[in-house]
Image: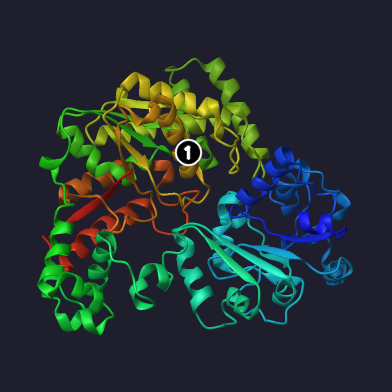
């Protein structure tokens, strides 16, 4: 933008929507406000738009771009272009042709920003898209619609079609930047970068472009060969963490327990340098076996008589991810407080509200409640929900009811683990109180609330959600608030409590990354699942299931059992189930 402006030439940007590029837009807005970056010389073309979709809809990409960029900088609205989702069916072909013509008239796209979908789609170029495709109407893949369900408050509300730039249109950009973040993008990034070009994975066509850069965080890059198994592509500088990863990988690759690996196994799998470093296979095997064994922490090795705060981003993350260790810490005599950071009210179905309203009305009918005030509340709630459309922000009364439902479930959950209702702290951080999936940035008010809890409890240990891949970013924002509060409450880190990171509902920490591995007996896992069952509003079909269709308790059972089973296959002690934690 600056170079084109200095040369007196316009800059044409191709823009993407979704959660991935939001950070880029935030930085562009900062550069505009703080460093004078001007958009007066910029023309923009967006990749896609749902169809049919009115520009003013809460779900439209027109609105998304205005909220995140267009209305926050000095960009001429007449020079912004988004595929016309409001057109009638008989106007679509001409509208798509006109969009292509507008791109050519602007001189083509200088820099195209891309995200990538779970199916490998760029724009909405779903599996089967041709390399010669242009701007057109497409039918959305089932996986794409499911991934968008959180933004539309249910998959049934996601449009079945969209207008998108074609693969050929995208590849004509002079430079392309593909962004990907989070663990659930790691597989498709590996396929995009290292796989063969395939019509079923549109992102692989980017390999034909002479000027593409893929920007990943470490989680999204995790499956790339150079990251996952760097010893297969180049010489490596061995360190203890990498050595452990290599031995565990080899053990799984050849199907042998760690202590049964031979020199031939190491030599045949590009690990001769690791063998040379330790001298013998026995020495390498012993190092890895002992390193894993030292991470196992049963109840006798867990803290006792300490003050513990478990920060739970949503009202069920505590029992889903840390239910086992919370129970053990309770049995060890620790004083435990659970800080529920957000209300989680947008993740409650309307029919759950109506169910509780029915209970209240029946109580009133039996003279257990005052009828007059209840009638006023129930009538307003029923009228609002009857008139509500998908994506509408709930009324304050409905938001409060949904908050109360989740708070009651949270109390019931920790009581199942042995804690008391007084151990629950409902922080209700302001950044979450938008009533929509889109949240406000974390601000001083959020940090102050966390600081106040730290000051009141003076904890020795914190349990914090370290999984940053939840579908709508709340875990990431909550961790930001905690990190800022710790920096403020403990200047220079003096007196700072120990922090254990747990993972959210989607994955477990790999055993090679975990600091502590906490075994769970069969009855302990059953108790943890019973605590999860207390969250009835999230049972059977949660409003925001993420990338996994299973219920939360099913994911928990599988991941905790799988972690223990992996250690068993590696030749360590056999346990029924296991939770993993990383000390930050």
Image quarter in which the C terminus is found: top left
The picture quadrant where one finds residue 425 is top left
**Residue found 23% across the figure and 68% down from its top:** 248
**Residue found 60% across the figure and 28% down from its top:** 396
Disc 1 is placed on an element classified as helix
- Image coords of residue 532 (percent x, y): 32, 44
Taking 98 as reference, is 318 left or right?
left
- Image coords of residue 311 (percent x, y): 37, 35
- The way the protein has been coloured in the rendering is rainbow
Residue 57 in view: no
**Residue found 84% across the figure and 63% down from its top:** 88
Q: Which of 463 and 504 is in front in this view?
A: 463
**Residue found 55% across the figure and 62% down from its top:** 215
Residue at label 1? Answer: 480
Image quarter in which the N terminus is found: bottom right
The picture quadrant where one finds residue 433 is top right
Q: Which of 130 and 227 is in front in this view?
A: 227
Residue 208 in view: yes
In the rendered view, tell whether residue 540 sits above or below residue 323. Answer: below
Taking 9 as reference, is 569 left or right?
left
């Amino acid at each position: 933008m600056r170079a084109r402006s200095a040369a007196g030439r316009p800059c044409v940007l191709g823009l993407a929507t979704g959660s991935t590029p939001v950070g880029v837009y935030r930085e562009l807005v900062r550069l505009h406000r703080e460093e004078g970056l001007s958009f007066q010389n910029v023309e923009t073309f967006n990749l896609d738009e749902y169809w049919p979709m009115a520009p003013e809809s809460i779900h439209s990409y027109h609105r998304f771009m205005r909220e995140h960029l267009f209305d926050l900088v000095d960009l001429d609205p007449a020079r912004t272009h988004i595929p016309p989702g409001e057109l009638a069916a008989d106007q679509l072909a001409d509208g798509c042709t006109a969009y292509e013509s507008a791109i050519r008239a602007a001189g083509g796209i200088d820099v195209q920003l891309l995200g990538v979908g779970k199916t490998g789609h760029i724009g909405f170029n779903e599996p089967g898209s041709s390399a010669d495709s242009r701007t057109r109407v497409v039918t959305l893949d089932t996986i794409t619609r499911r991934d968008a369900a959180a933004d539309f408050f249910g998959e049934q509300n996601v449009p079945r079609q969209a207008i998108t730039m074609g693969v050929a249109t995208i590849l004509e950009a002079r430079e392309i930047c593909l962004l990907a973040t989070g663990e659930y993008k790691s597989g498709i990034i590996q396929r995009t970068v290292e796989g063969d070009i395939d019509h079923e994975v549109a992102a692989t066509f980017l390999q034909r472009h002479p000027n593409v850069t893929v920007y990943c965080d470490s989680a999204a890059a995790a499956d790339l060969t150079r990251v996952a198994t760097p010893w297969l592509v180049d010489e490596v500088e061995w360190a203890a963490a990498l050595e452990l990863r290599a031995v565990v990988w080899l053990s799984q690759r050849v199907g042998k327990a760690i202590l049964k690996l031979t020199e031939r196994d190491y030599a045949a799998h590009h690990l001769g340098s690791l063998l040379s470093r330790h001298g013998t296979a026995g020495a390498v095997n012993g190092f890895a076996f002992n390193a894993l064994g030292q991470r196992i922490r049963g109840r006798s090795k867990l803290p006792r008589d300490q003050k513990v705060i478990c920060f739970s981003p949503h009202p069920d993350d505590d029992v889903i991810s840390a239910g086992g260790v919370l129970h053990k810490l309770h049995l060890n005599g620790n004083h435990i407080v659970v800080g529920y950071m957000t209300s989680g009210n947008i993740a409650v179905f309307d029919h759950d509200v109506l169910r509780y309203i029915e209970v209240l009305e029946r109580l009133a009918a039996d003279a257990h409640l005052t009828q007059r005030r209840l009638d006023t509340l129930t009538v307003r709630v029923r009228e609002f929900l009857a008139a509500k459309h998908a994506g509408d922000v709930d009324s304050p009364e409905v938001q409060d009811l949904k908050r109360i439902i989740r708070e009651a479930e949270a109390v019931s959950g920790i009581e199942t683990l042995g804690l008391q209702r007084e151990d629950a702290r409902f922080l209700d951080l302001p950044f979450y109180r938008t009533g929509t999936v889109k949240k406000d940035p974390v601000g001083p008010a959020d940090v102050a609330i966390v600081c106040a809890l730290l000051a009141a409890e003076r904890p020795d240990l914190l349990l914090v959600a370290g999984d940053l891949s939840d579908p709508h970013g709340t875990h990431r924002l909550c961790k930001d608030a905690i990190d800022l509060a710790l920096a403020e409450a403990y200047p220079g880190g003096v007196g700072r409590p120990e922090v254990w990171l747990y993972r959210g509902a989607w994955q477990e920490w790999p055993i090679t990354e975990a600091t502590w591995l906490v075994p769970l007996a069969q009855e302990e896992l059953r108790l943890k699942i019973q605590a999860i069952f207390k969250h009835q509003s999230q049972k059977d079909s949660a409003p925001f299931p993420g990338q996994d269709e299973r219920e939360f308790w099913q994911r928990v059972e599988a991941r905790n059992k799988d972690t223990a089973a992996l250690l068993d296959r590696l030749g360590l002690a056999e346990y029924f189930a296991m939770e993993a934690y990383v000390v930050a």
